[in-house]
Amino acid sequence: MTSDNVYFILTRQPENPKHINAGCICYMSVYKHKSTTKKKPPPSKFPVIPLGSYSSVDYEIELSCLEQLSEQELALLLALPEDAERLKWWKDEKTLHTALELTEDTAVTVEEGGEELRGIIRYIGKLTTYPPLSGTFFGIELQGADKGKGKTDGKFEYKKLFSCPKDCGVFAPFSRVRPVVPDSLSPSVRQSDPPPEMEELAPGDRVTYFIDDKLFHGMVVNVQEKGGEFLVRISTDTDQSGKRGGEIEVPLLNVAKGEVPAEVESMDVDTTAVEAHTEDLYTEDLSLNSLVEVSVTSGNLYGIIRWIGTLTGLPGRPETMAGLELEEDKGTSNGTFKSVRFFECPPKRALFVKLSSCRPDSRFQIPSAMQTAKAADTEMEPDTENLETVPPVSTEQVNQILIGRMKGIQGHCNSCYMDAALFSLFSCSSVLDSMLFISTKPRDAPIQNTLLYDIVNPLRRKGFVEGRHVMKLRQQLQKHGYSHSFTTDEKDPEEFLTVIMHHILALDPLLKLSAGSKVQESYCYQIFLDQKHSLVLPTVQQLLEHSFHSAGLKLAEAPSCLILQMPRFGKKFKMFDKIVPSLELDVTDLLSEGPQQCMLCGNLAQKECKDCFEDPVFSRTGFKIFCSTCSHQVHAHPQRQSHKPADLEIPKSYISRGTPQPQALTRDKMQLFAVLCIETSHYVSFIKHGPNSQDWIFFDSMADREGERDGYNIPEVQACPEVAMYLEMSPAELATQVPRDMKGVAKRLFCDAYMYLYESTSMCLYR
């Protein structure tokens, strides 16, 4: 796939154009590369095209900014989603070259969910054939104590790439994979365990270092390797004797970048107190998983209480201590103290402080107007002891319950993917309410209760959910081990939905796809298109039909809920500048079984012709199915005599009744109820809440903010009737619309669509 082109990586930001970032991969044809390099005098710039660009416009880039990539290097770097990440790992020559030498059956460690897991490489290659130029990933079968911590049995989507037991497989890019025995290490210094993640330090950095569990501050002089160990030479503020101006060498493991507050003194750990204290409640209603803040000299640190207990050895009586997992890398460890582990978290995220030094996270304090409303209405906090069913917000209630500031779900700490997904699914639709009441395992019941009592019910009753409730859900998911970064990092909506619907609540798959004789199950469908497609300004109906046609898929049964992911290359590259929402999705012709109408005469269809799918004589929408008579007439034309119509599967019950009349053949149609959109890594959502063309609302969980670092996000729901004006335009008129000039928030619906959600009002009665 790469032999026709020469590929480069931008090693720094070019002077022009400014919108192409360092780390971007570009290419030019081999022919153009040869002709350009032969020019006299040698050129100072190359005409290249950024990878992922849907135009063939050349950009003249300085040669000094470009480094040519081998095909193997290109494949490894394409597995990384962002330009900055590609540049970072391209510069790490040792890791990149080590990855090029990895082979199947090599023992490795893989970073997954904040942990280093042991495994063996079972597969090296692409995960998907779309886009054709895609990255090389490593399929790893986890071993020993790490079995069961994976996410797959060797399948990616519907394809089996290698075989291993359930949840014992991981797919990862090279940046997260390391050989257990690196070739660069001599046998004398090879370790049985991989080295922990190290933080980059440079001369002049302010640091905190630890000696005998006492805390000191200083400035980095240099970092060097001695005898296989990295040591940091530090100019100390004060040494162990209290003297100023000295220097000391400290192992890198004992150094934290920045100035960590001197809260922890020399202490002996009372490990017997851990179990006795971890379930108790403490001052100011602080307990495990409380969101808290701690004041330090440089400002406030924010985190989550992961452990509470006593640490003996303090002057006077032992005080109650809290182990915090911080939002930022300003801690002292990964949850250990004096080689004793108290909780799990990423490196540099753990900090042990006095519980009395903690206070509730002020960023989640509700504004005074909301506090007054909460005090006046005790229903703001639902009674979780009594099961109750709050119906979705109706069209008549939208203005009263949902519209306004401090409405919807309050965002916090990269939560927009979850806020937008939950608001879309539950604010005005009940199609997936079975998630809220389905029988679950005892260990999963708390997650279901949080979803029902703390999020869905308050959203539908009062139109507002505090950010702490979504954080609670994220904490519970993280505790289950699906991802150690659920509370801190941005995810994709489909990852969250799959975890909660499949792994947690064991909901029956929403989608059953028929591919020949096999039926594949899924919770959402990613639209892929053949590169030869002719679509320019497509509707969702056209995208779905073209995707099914190119993949040879059919629906094994009509779904009650259909979640469609739009054709994009990650969050950054869109295949189409605009996509027209199909308010109604007709899936009749996508079904593998069932009576269908001839597209010409309306009688019972008996033939389908895939060759006619893109014939310009027919409509641009719908599979081309005919009755026997019409099929014979259509394919009598000289241009279609080479076509190969196939028989449709028709239930015997219909055949035995004789040919039904056209009016007896009903169509299976689904209604659009929500659209998730993404722009610059921020998710928002649109809701179609009623039958009228103007019944649209727009939700942003982080529409505004009160205060800076110590402030809080203000969610907002607003009516957006302007959407109707663009939906009523002809394709030609809509194509001429300049996105930045579109009224209100309409541009985001048409240009930034990420996921469409459809429901069947008839099928949901049976699911």
Image: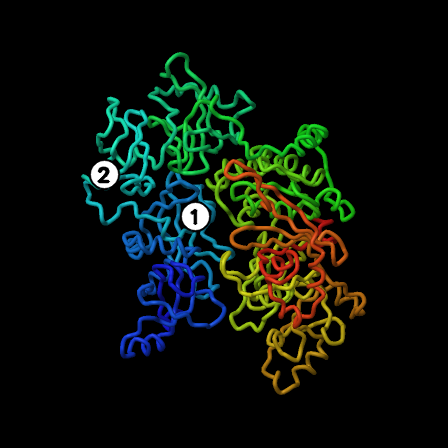
Residue 414 x, y percent position in the rendering: 52, 44
Total labels: the figure holds 2
Local SS, label 2: strand
Tell me the mark number nearer the camera, choosing from 1 and 2. 2
Residue 48 sits in which quadrant? bottom left
Residue 617 x, y percent position in the rendering: 66, 80
What numbered label is drawn on residue 462? none
Local SS, label 1: strand
In this rendering, position of residue 568 left or right of residue 195 = right
Quadrant in which the N terminus is drawn: bottom left
Residue that mark 2 sits on = 229
| Of 85 and 179, the residue lying toward us | 85
Determine the residue located farthest toward the bottom in the rendered image: 638
Residue that mark 1 sits on = 169
Residue 458 sits in which quadrant? top right
Residue 600 sits in which quadrant? bottom right
Specify few, some or many for label 1: CA neighbours under 10 Å numbering under 14, 14-19, or 20 or more. many
Q: How far is the residue under mark 1 from the one under mark 2? A: 32 Å
Specify few, some or many for label 2: CA neighbours under 10 Å numbering under 14, 14-19, or 20 or more. few
In this rendering, position of residue 78 left or right of residue 496 = left
Give yes or no for contact between labels 1 and 2 (Cβ–Cβ under 8 Å).
no
| Of 114 and 437, the residue lying toward us | 114
Amino acid type at mark 2: Glu
Q: Mark 1 or mark 2: name the one nearer the start of the chain.
A: 1
Q: Which residue appears at 31% of the width and 50% of the height? A: 106
In this rendering, position of residue 204 left or right of residue 679 = left
Residue 339 x, y percent position in the rendering: 33, 28
| Of 180 and 422, the residue lying toward us | 422
Q: Above or below — where is 80 with respect to 166?
A: below
Amino acid type at mark 1: Gly
